[in-house]
Image: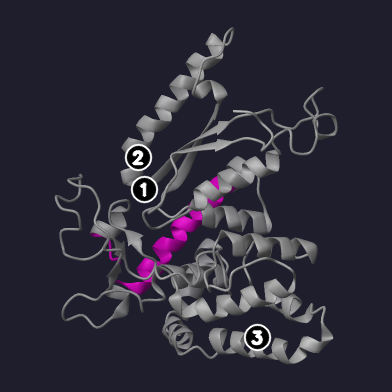
Amino acid sequence: MLRLFDGFDHTSPRLRDAVKALQKELRREKFRLRLDGLFGRDTEDAVKRFQRAHGLDDDGVVGPLTWVVLLADQADPGSAADTAGSASAIKVCLVDDPVLLQEMVEAGQYRAMVATAAAAYGIPLPVIGAVGSRESRWGLALKLPAGVTIRAAGTGDFAKRSCPTRYRSGPLPPNGGGFGRGLMQIDFDFHEFARTGNWADPQSNIEYGCRVLADCRTFMRRRAGLQDAELVRAMLASSSPGRHRGTIVFTGATASLRGGAMFHNLAVGKFGLRALAQSMAREFQPQGVHVAHVIIDGQIASDRPGRSIAERGLDAVLDPNAIAESYYQLHLQPPSAWTLELDLRPYAEKF
């Protein structure tokens, strides 16, 4: 399985060859991509477009079904040998990779604990497996304290943070470990369990991580009315045992930057909203909450007279789906590179 940010030095450099094989197959489908082995936004966009074109779930994640369709959809029969080479590379990278096999073995010892937590909180086994893999590689990515040999008792995330805070005087937790605790990387700053709980016990850690997921699932079901796959995605997007604790996006307008004649009532509110976003970002981003202000500069396509695509043209009004995608991408940004303010406008809009 491949997804956004795979292949990068800070995520999974071991998957770079697999990402490069994916990019090679996408280029056969006429997508213009660099063969750099980095699963960036351009590769994700190509994957989503390919999935939509073939009736697949366009989540941008390259799982077994996407691989099957991608490798089977060869327009040039003469390229069979080359296709076999790509398939072999994918097999080597994804199945025979000793690092991935080691992680699979490591995860196997927690299978009974995962099954217990899955049954208790109603979280699918593959979801728990994926979270544990991404957070700590099931312990393989954690740093162990001196004299400790149990991987589940290790910590991660040693990036220094602002201080002092309520729970620490220095840039790292007082006991010398990292902020992420245990297999599910429960964050020291944001979870009492990571400070005083039995986080080093693998079963307790897994169960706590699943409780966080279940709480977010309940919230998203109640507030957004989502079900099935959409609910699982929202649960994963809104939950984080680690330091990204959510995203707040404020919607501004051109009046956020300059007041127009006869629009003083709008300008005052939008100026204030922008100031609120700036203040909240400075207050809450150190606590793991991403705050962003989006300026919508143009009319949004709707059924109202004069605002439809049919009347104004395809690129003369903002597509609501495109706006939603931009908001979603803001939520996905890694904490090391958060956007505070974003302008959205049709390319034909004057500014």
* Position in image of residue 103 (x %, y %): 44, 83
* Position in image of residue 306 (x %, y %): 80, 23
- First in sequence: mark 3 or mark 2? 3
Q: Please give the residue where the numbered disc 1 appears in the rendered image.
A: 288
Label placed on residue 284: 2
Q: Closer to the camera, 32 or 48?
A: 32
Q: Please give the residue where the numbered disc 3 appears in the rendered image.
A: 86
Q: What residue appears at the point 69 percent right and 43 percent down from the top-left corner?
A: 321
Q: CA distance from mark 3 to mark 1?
A: 40 Å
Position of residue 339 relative to residue 74, above or below, is: above
Identify residue type, mark 1.
Answer: Gly
Q: Residues within 10 Å of mark 2 (few under 14, many from 20)?
A: few
Identify residue type, mark 2.
Answer: Phe
Position of residue 305 relative to residue 160, above or below, is: above
Quadrant in the picture for the C terminus: top right
Residue 27 sits inside the magenta stretch: no
Position of residue 310 relative to residue 30, above or below, is: above
Q: CA distance from mark 1 to mark 2?
A: 7 Å
* Position in image of residue 3 (x %, y %): 56, 67
Tell me where the magenta segment starts and ends, as one range: 196-220
Residue 41 lies in quadrant:
bottom right
Q: Closer to the camera, 185 or 108?
A: 185
Identify residue type, mark 3.
Answer: Ser
